[in-house]
Structure formats: structure tokens, C-alpha cells
Amino acid sequence: MTRKLSFVLGIVLLAITSRPVLAHHGGAAFDQTKQQTLQGTVTMLDFVNPHVVSLLLDQGVQHTLTYPNQFNLGASYKPIAPLLLTFGWTWERFHVYQQDLFVGDHGVTVVVPRNYKNGYTLRFGAEYQAIPKLKVRAGFLRDTSPSRPETLSPTLPDGDVWAVSVGAGYELMPGLEVNGGYFHAFYDTVSTPPGADAFPAIYDTRANIYALNVTWKMGAAK
């Protein structure tokens, strides 16, 4: 999500006890609601009786998309020198997203109901310095989806999620590091309720993300 307006509400940096490794950090940020206007051309594919004239025409389409307010809160804690624990909470005011309205310049208008509610995400993570050059990482999250079963659509399938991730980073030389990670999401099964004005379906989704990157810090000490 592109953010054009954001401001930091507060940053807290505290150290506890006399040992420098026992410390925690925290911060918060808020993003204001914003709108983005999308424009494009739609090509109509209308499968009808060849003797019937279709009224659907290729045409330009405009859609205004509203991004919700978002509040982020995060904290980290280092109980011992090699172990870092992290926590994050995100709240999104998604009830502003009630529908997708596509307006064509040849008289065609398409409305896709969304009727979203507010949602939030909880994240927990840990990083452990196994050896001087190797860090191992793991985490999990719980995301409460803003979508409702009554208006869930194949165009934007969603649901509450449990997810886990693992990863590692290895320093090849000062300033040069290789990082890899794996993320798996278990979506709750969602069924369209009887009589709902939505495509009848059962959504049972899984998602996998693999990541690999190489980081080079210019000017790092040798």
C-alpha cells in the first residue's frame, strides 16, 4: 500500500537494569485515510447467441479506491545478548471500504459489494545469534480479515489467517550478508452463507512465500 501521508506518534527508547543487553524499544505510527483514482480500458468478452447484438462495448473505466486509516504499534526486547524478541500490532479501519464501483464512459457501471469491517494483525518474532556470523529467525502472526462471508468474492478472496515463518542470515564477509526465509499462511475456511448476494463457494486457501536476498553495506569495516 502506497503511503503519502504518515506521521510518527511517538518513539520510546528505554534501558532496564545495569546490563546493556537487557533493553527494550518501542514505537508507533499512524497513516491517514487516502484515496486513489484508477483509470484503464476494459475489453468486453460477451458470449451470447450470435444472432443477438451485445450492448457491451470496449470502454474506459474509472474507479476510486479508498485506503483505510492504519495504526501500527511495535516493540522489541533483548533478554540476553544473542536473543532479540519482537512484537507488532496493526489496526486497520477498513469499514471505509464498502464497495468497488467501476464507472465506464459508455454507460456501463459495475458494483462489487465489499462491506468490510475493521481488522487487525498481531505479529511475534525472534532472532538468535547462533554463531558470530549466523542469525536464525522465526515468527508467527494472527490476522483478522476485514472481509465478511456474505460479500466474499473470488475477485478478492480473504479470511482470518494463522501464519508461521522461519529464516536465517549469514555474513559472508564484513558488509556482505545473505538472508533467506520461508512464510506459510493457513487461512481459515470460509463458506458463503445461504441466500447471500455473492458467488456461492467454499474458500480453503494456503499461501507460501520464499525469499532470498543479498545485502551489501558499502563502507562496512573490514
Image (cartoon, rainbow, N blue to C red):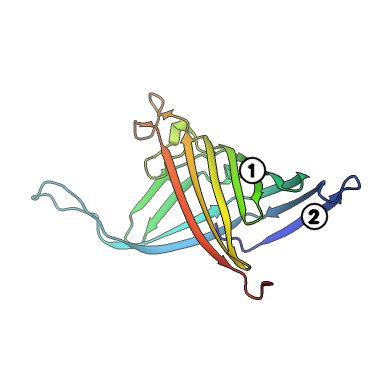
Report whether 44 appears left or right of 34.
left
Q: Relative to residue 59, is residue 80 depicted above or below?
A: above
SS for callout 1: strand
Q: Position of residue 18 (x, y in %)?
A: 91, 47
| Residue contact between numbered discs 2 and 1, judged by CB atoms under 8 Å | no
Q: Position of residue 13 (x, y in %)?
A: 83, 53
Q: Nearer the viewer, mark 2 or mark 1?
A: 1
| Quadrant in which the C terminus appears | bottom right
Residue at image x 66%, y 46%? Answer: 128
Q: Of all residues shown, which one is farthest toward the bottom?
A: 219
For this rendering, which residue is in front, 26 or 65?
A: 26
Question: Residue 17 appears in which quarter of the rendering?
Answer: top right
| Quadrant in which the N terminus appears | bottom right
- Residue 11's label in the rendered image is 2
Residue named by callout 1: 125
Q: Position of residue 160 (x, y in %)?
A: 52, 34
Report whether 103 appears left or right of 167.
left
For this rendering, which residue is in front, 113 or 119?
A: 119
